[in-house]
Image (cartoon, rainbow, N blue to C red):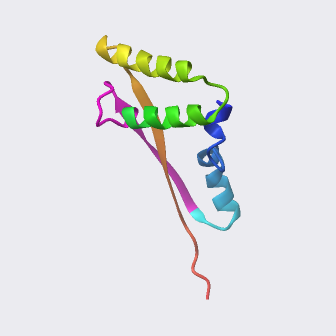
Amino acid sequence: MKAYTAVYSNAHLPRTLPEQMAKAGFSDVDVDGFVVLNLNFAEDTYARQSAEFAVSIMSESQEFSSAEQMSWLADQERLNQESGFFFSLNRYLISASKPVTT
């Protein structure tokens, strides 16, 4: 997990941003979420793109060997072939209002 969070300046921003916005003077802070769900590992899925991103992160980390990376990808392909593939990811939309000052 350290390899994954290391590529972000703040991997936990969705959890803390609403409070930070309120403290900065924003009002009507609202958080909505939506789910990205893929039940297969096809080339045109978010899951496939995310897997490629994950492998790029693994390749930059000393935590994962090339064999482990390829084994993980092979597992995703196997799950897809056996109809056992499941990918779910939450995304967040954060909105707020800032009073106009003159």
| Magenta segment boundaries in residue numbering | 28-47
Instruction: Estimate the x, y position of residue 12 in percent, counting from the top left.
Output: 64, 43
Q: In the image, is residue 54 above or below residue 29?
A: above
Q: Quadrant of residue 25?
A: bottom right
- Which residue of the protein is positioned furthest toward the front in this rendering? 66
Q: Quadrant of residue 44?
A: top left
Tell me, yes or no, whether the highlighted magenta stretch contains residue 18: no
The C terminus lies in which quarter of the figure? Answer: bottom right
Q: Indicate yes or no whether the magenta region holds residue 37.
A: yes
Residue in view at x 61 percent, y 53 percent: 18
Residue 38 position in % (x across, y down): 34, 29
In the figure, is residue 10 to the left or right of 28? right
Instruction: Please state which of residues 77 and 28 is positioned toward the viewer in this rendering.
Output: 77
| Residue displayed at 58% across by 75% down | 99
Q: Position of residue 2 (x, y in %)?
A: 68, 33
Closer-to-camera residue (72/29): 72
Q: Is residue 13 left or right of residue 33?
A: right
Q: Quadrant of residue 65?
A: top right
